[in-house]
Image (spheres, grey):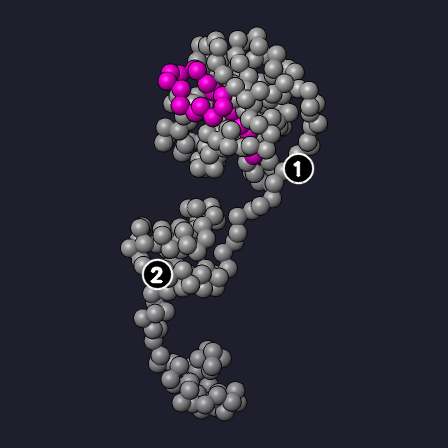
Amino acid sequence: MKAVYTLRHEHKVTTLCRVLRVNRSSYYKHYKQTESKRAIENQKIRTHILQIYSDAKCRYGTHKMCRVLETKYGIKISPGRVYRLMKGMQLPKMSTIKPKFKTAKQSDSLPCPNILKQKFNPKAPNIAWCSDITYIKVENRFYYLCVIIDLFSRRVIAYHISSKIDTKLVLDTFEIALKERNYPKGTIFHSDRGSQYTSADFRKRLDNAGFIQSFSAKGHPYDNAVAESFFKATPHNLPIAAKRGIIKL
């Protein structure tokens, strides 16, 4: 049918239909046919889906896509229909490639007390800070972002990016935080049990600064829930995060 439509200006339609074994009535029906209301509507929805999916960095599935379509565009649509449209669009999935980490063995005798004990709402600044590290993939390379958050304001008071996930990354971030907050004393510094935080160099620096170190229990990420949720909710775009007041630049 497509070949007949393409060559109709070069040869007679009767000849093309005979050679290609296409019924003339079927050809004329197809030629005069207009897109259905449903097809036009689907194309419009696909455009919105593509925009939402791009803005969400390929993270949204069927049900979340339905909610956004309704709240943002006023389109009420069933999950099944959204699923069929997204499947037909063959949208790329978010990359699940992660950097390979070398796990450092920790001594069972290493003192790692949980001083904070999930008290995430101190009554004043510089009573408790928390910290964590995440990775960012840029042009097939991984970079590591360390942040330190004051639990009172929930703002990032210091951050640093490095191509290496080592103790120096945490030390450099800590120095930025100290300078930003005029070198406070007696502050609780809470983190997970990563080797960067349990290293002798970092623990010694905390002691010299007059800080009290606190660790999440092994296998309990919710002990550091503020830092964990920050990385989950905040896009890896520091200028946008700063504009929203999440990061203090």
Residue range in magenta is 116-135
Residue 200 picture location, percent across and down: 65, 16
Residue 132 - label: none
Residue 32 picture location, percent across and down: 35, 81
Residue 9 picture location, percent across and down: 43, 81
Q: Amino acid at mark 2?
A: Ile
Taking the spot 48% from the left edge, 10% from the top edge, the residue there is 186
Q: Is tag 2's residue or tag 1's residue first in the polypeptide sequence?
A: 2
In the depicted view, which residue is nearer to us: 120 or 19? 120
- Disc 1 target residue: 100
The question of residue 123 being in magenta is answered with yes
The picture quadrant where one finds residue 237 is top left
Q: Is residue 159 visible?
A: no
- Disc 2 target residue: 77
Image quadrant for the C terminus? top left
Taking the spot 61% from the left edge, 16% from the top edge, the residue there is 202
In the depicted view, which residue is nearer to us: 204 or 35? 204
- Mostly what secondary structure, the magenta segment? loop
Q: Viewer-nearest of labels 2 and 1? A: 2
Residue 105 picture location, percent across and down: 71, 27
Q: Is 10 drawn above or below residue 117 in the view shown?
A: below
Q: Secondary structure at mark 1?
A: loop
Determine crowd level at label 2: few under 14, some 14-19, many 20+ residues with C-alpha closer than 10 A: some
The question of residue 81 being in magenta is answered with no
In the depicted view, which residue is nearer to us: 221 or 233? 221
Taking the spot 45% from the left edge, 61% from the top edge, the residue there is 83
Q: Amino acid at mark 1?
A: Lys
52 relative to 163 in the view: left or right: left
Q: Is residue 88 visible?
A: yes
Q: Is 33 drawn above or below residue 42 in the view shown?
A: below
